[in-house]
Image (tube, rainbow, N blue to C red):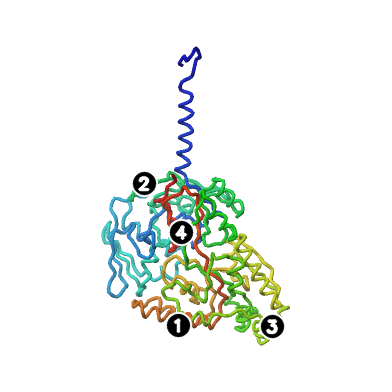
Amino acid sequence: MKIWNGIVVAAAVLPLLGSAAFAQADAKLKTLVVAVPSDPVALEPGTNKAEPIGSEIILNVFDTLVAWTAPDFKVLEGRLAKSWTVSDDGKVFDFRLREGVKFQDGTAFDAAAVKFSLERTKATNPYVKATFDLIKEITVVSPTELKITLSAAYPAFLSILAQPQAAIVSPAAVAKYGDKFASNPVGTGPFAFKSAQADTNVVLEANPNYFRGAPKLSQIIYRVIPDASTRRLELEGGGVDIVQQQGQLSAIAAQDIEALKANKDLKVLEASSQIIRQLEFNNSKTDGPFSNLKARQAIAHAIDYDGLLQGVFGGTAERVYGPLTSNSWAFNPKMKELAPKYDPELAKKLLAEAGIKPSSLNLKLYSFQGPLWGAVATFVQANLADIGINATIEQTEFPALRTLQTSGQFDVALDGRQPWYNDPDAHITIGYLSSLANTAMTFRMPQDKALDDLILKAQQTPDMEVRKQLYFTIQEEIAKRVPGAYLFSPKLIVFARANVEGLVVNSAPPLNEYWSVSKK
């Protein structure tokens, strides 16, 4: 107590209140709140199938052997691997690993943990079957040396090792939690998993012992906010720091982007992508209307591609002409000529030649949830109506749509592929190899030995120029089969509060890492 001008004053009160307010403000600056449209799926590498939210969390809780180097993401750098060499035949990869790295449970990272993790993912995750099945043997040479031998040359293998599915898990934690490891993930990453509440949030805490140095943030909260307008309001009001497109077109409506760009409290980060969104057919279904090539061609000519880009996207997406985007190093320029043109009359003619009455087709048009997906579905629905086809839109959550797709319970669906590494193999092999037809994110291609042989040859050819020419041929062959109507490639867009610093939008894979991010 102090006496000032005859008044007894509790001198410590104001400083204490000030300290509390300062601590609260500091905590807010150390916490990054990321708005996401739904709960993450598969928070650990062994079961992850490229669902964006869970995949991003994995890349912040775990580390991979290698990763793409910011800001261009065109060159791979070592993470848990210090260096590596590749044999002349492209089949043997020798890695030297970092020393002294610890998992978040305090156990040591070593070559045995890498072997355990990669073999575990290979055994449990069908999503990576096309690539991990090429692993013939993993040999622990010493605690800091590892040899991976492939059964065939695979030029994109290092890119595969940068994917979330190739992240390294704690063997001790897997032994401890068993089937519940996905609810208690433990890696070596900059943030450790703390908690998850369904339909509410996922909380990560900083790993102070991270081998690259402690992150600048103390906490990341992924807030589940299903409604796009609510996400925008929360962003503008400061309730969340980041809203992502996540490649799902479900973050914030395209028409709102210009208004957000004009808001001095916000910033909009954009980057080109190799994401493809399409109207795809169930190509494994032999008794459906689209088992007929001319029926598939008719639908492809019924879509007003330019109208879709101009009317729905307003500059936030580009035309896709075939199985690869035009910014891929293996894109065949001829695809621009081969791509279907908008021609409703030709579409009607092709349906007639296929012996199909448009009025007999009552389609369920499946799509992801979200206002922009809804706008795309409504646009396509109107295009189909113009040639006499009635389509009912069924917007479905990501996990449910994936289940529907892999079980083959659909005729046509709006879908897409979000590549996780910068190689045409990311689209072509998983999307079109017939042996993978029943796995997630494919065109469900029927058996086709000639096309399969081409795909596998391109996947395994070490000479990059030869590979490029093989992919040119593959694109033309796929175009002949019309497995879908290729619609657009969305830009990668991240909406952030202006005080978020150090965030770089990663295009390969299109997921954000927050180790270098801070708030001022």
Quadrant of the image occupied by residue 486: bottom right
Q: For the residue marked with disc 1, what is the amino acid?
A: Thr
All told, the count of numbered labels is: 4
Q: Residue placed farthest to the bottom in the image?
A: 353
Q: Label 4: which residue?
A: 511
Residue, disc 1: 473
How far apart are the two marked residues, 3 and 4, measured between alpha carbons? 43 Å
Q: Nearer the viewer, mark 3 or mark 1?
A: 1
Left or right relative to 323: residue 464? left
Sequence-wise, the earlier of marks 1 and 4 is 1
Q: Identify the mark nearer the N-term, 3 or 1.
A: 3
> Would you say the residues marked 2 and 4 are in contact, meaning their CB atoms lie under 8 Å apart?
no
The residue at which mark 2 appears reads as 214
The foreground one among 229 and 472 is 229
Q: Amino acid type of disc 4?
A: Leu
Is the residue 270 above or below the residue 183 in the image? below
Confirm or deny contact between disc 1 and disc 2 (CB under 8 A). Answer: no
Image point (65%, 69%), residue name? 379
